[in-house]
Structure formats: C-alpha cells, structure tokens
Amino acid sequence: DTAVSQTPKYLVTQMGNDKSIKCEQNLGHDTMYWYKQDSKKFLKIMFSYNNKELIINETVPNRFSPKSPDKAHLNLHINSLELGDSAVYFCASRQGTYNSPLHFGNGTRLTVT
Amino acid sequence: DQQVKQNSPSLSVQEGRISILNCDYTNSMFDYFLWYKKYPAEGPTFLISISSIKDKNEDGRFTVFLNKSAKHLSLHIVPSQPGDSAVYFCAASNAGGTSYGKLTFGQGTILTVHP
C-alpha cells in the first residue's frame, strides 16, 4: 500500500494555465507538507498543515495555494503558471510537528512550456 | 542562506568498503537531524535520525555521528553495497518557536558504490 501518494506523476502545461496536484496519505499522520525541488536539487519547504490548519507558509508567490480538506489530504493549486515553476513537487507527512521523520511521496514533475 | 550544507556533490566507493557522507550546519538551534536516501524518480526515503542529546545513533549498516561543537554530522555505511547507490540528503530541524519542526535539507551527495 502506498503511504503517501501524489497525482499526477508528470504534468506538462503551458504558461498561464492553472493546475492542481493532489496528495493523500494513509499513515494516519496529522501534519502534511509541500516541498519543491528546484533545478539545483535543493528541497525547499513551501507549506505545512497540521490538523488542517496552515502552520508554515514560506515565501511562496500568491499564485500557489494549498488546501487541506482533511488530515489525510493536502492539495496544491497553482495559478498563472510561469516557466520558473518547473520543478519536482513533493508531498510529505509526519506525525506531530517535530522529532519525527517525514514520509515523502514520489513527486510530481511539473514542466511549464 | 544555506543553513545545511553537503559540500561533496559526489562520492565513489568500492563495494564492501565504508562510505562516509558529511554534512555541516550553521544554525545552532537545530536539535534533530536526519538522513534520507533518494533513488531517481522516487521520493526521499528516511534512513536514520539523531537528536542533539546524542552523539551517535546506529541502525544496522548505518551510523550517524553528531559533533555539536563543530556543527557537523556524518553518515557511515558499512559495508557499502551497490544498492546503496543513490542521492543522500541530510536534514535538520528545531522544535522551538514558529519553526514547527520544519526540515531544512542539504543539497545532496550522490553516492556510487562499485561492485
């Protein structure tokens, strides 16, 4: 059984479009994250939700909007896509907010043309 | 400001020998450290962690060492196996304030283990 699953795995779209990435975890965790891995391979945190409440919101353009309908789901909607948004986006979850490992999904490779 | 740094982009080791991956950090507030392994087209997989109250943690072939005074941690893999070939990320966090245990990652080291 997949613990943290993201869809789609690949997403190719044109500049200016709006797209969403979905994430679901079946680990019973109460905290979920979105990380972005850029072209230099750095993994940088974007958002975190704990029990559906936003707790971390890094310096991310307003075009990115996370939504957590329940503890098991965290979606990422991106408006007006730009070339610089091309990256791999990883969803992750953990139990609690510290001193426990994150469990990652397999990533969504977004390519904006 | 890169608070977690892995200065070696790559490491090549012979099967059966020891692999040593290094990581330096600058934030003295970090109190929990982790190592992840990542294969291509997959997400990072948790390997081993250590809290700042310890200086060593061992799990099978993997041992993590923490030197708080030097702000340095390392991952030892003994013996190395070809299946260990992957990108290794170190990460750090602190529980205090509004950081909410946010994990900050290094840029990764590509480990290649030759048969």
Image (spheres, rainbow, N blue to C red):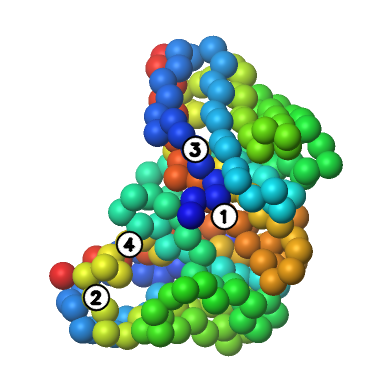
Which label belongs to residue A82? 2
Label 1: state its secondary structure. strand
- Cα separation between marks 2 and 4: 11 Å
Q: Is residue B47 above or below residue A90?
A: above
Amino acid bearing label 3: Gln
- Disc nearest the viewer among 1 and 4: 1
Mark 1 lies on residue: B104
How many residues crowd around disc 4 within 10 Å: few (fewer than 14), some, or many (20 or more)?
A: some
Q: Is residue B9 above or below residue B91?
A: above
Mark 3 lies on residue: B6
| Callouts 1 and 4 on one subunit | no
Whether pointer 3 and pointer 2 mark residues with C-beta atoms closer than 8 Å, the reply is no
Amino acid bearing label 2: Glu
Q: Dividing the image into 4 quarters, which one contains the N terminus of chain A?
A: bottom right
Which residue sits at x=40%, y=33%? B9
Kindly identify which chain the residue marked by label 3 belongs to.
B
Q: Is residue A56 above or below residue B43?
A: below
Whether pointer 1 and pointer 3 mark residues with C-beta atoms closer than 8 Å, the reply is no
Instruction: Tell me the quarter of the picture where residue A106 sits.
Output: bottom left
